[in-house]
Image (tube, rainbow, N blue to C red):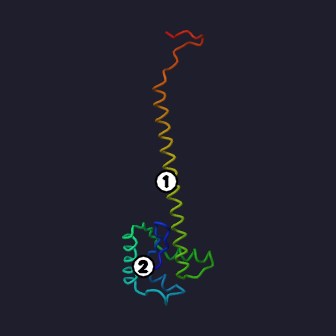
Amino acid sequence: MNPSSGAYTVAMPWYEREDFYRLLELSADRKDMTADYDVWQSKATAVAREYLARGRALQIITIRPDEFLEWLDAQGLPNSSPNRLRYVEMRASAAAAVVADIATAANAVAAVASLRRDAASVDQRIPLDHHQKDGTPAR
């Protein structure tokens, strides 16, 4: 279990029980991996708790075999620990970009709403021109 960490956020791989054994079976480095899901899960949970206790944010990336193996094939890479980590980092970066896009869109919507409120309050403060075209007051 080697999560990738930035300044505050840790990108951590996660496996569902039904996926763990398939990925293990297809791993080029399976001899270096924990072969029991319960043992892996216990270790991964301990690592997650350790990072959380140190005030780090966790971004859990679930590795699904079909998607992961397709990505490996497209990249021409073997199923190995460094490539699993690379995949997790890529997925975490993509997720962060989506979150940033959502935040940017939310900020833009808030800014437009604020401008509309400001424009409405300005309209209320400026008296309407009650003069005719020739400059005389309207009746």
- Of marks 1 and 2, the one in the foreground: 1
Q: Residue at x 53, y 75 (%)?
A: 68
Measuring from the top left, give residue 53's x and y in whole percent: 36, 70
Measuring from the top left, give residue 60's x and y in whole percent: 44, 70
Q: Amino acid at mark 2?
A: Glu
Question: Is residue 126 shown above or below 118?
Answer: above
Decide which of 64, 92 is in the foreground and name it. 92
* Residue at mark 2: 18
Q: Amino acid at mark 1?
A: Ala
Determine the secondary structure under disc 2.
helix
Decide which of 70, 87 is in the foreground and name it. 87
* Residue at mark 1: 103
Q: Residue at x 55, y 69 (%)?
A: 90
- Taking the image as shown, residue 8 lies to the left or right of residue 86, namely left
Q: Residue at x 52, y 18 (%)?
A: 129
- Taking the image as shown, residue 30 lies to the left or right of residue 42, namely right
Decide which of 76, 60 is in the foreground and name it. 60
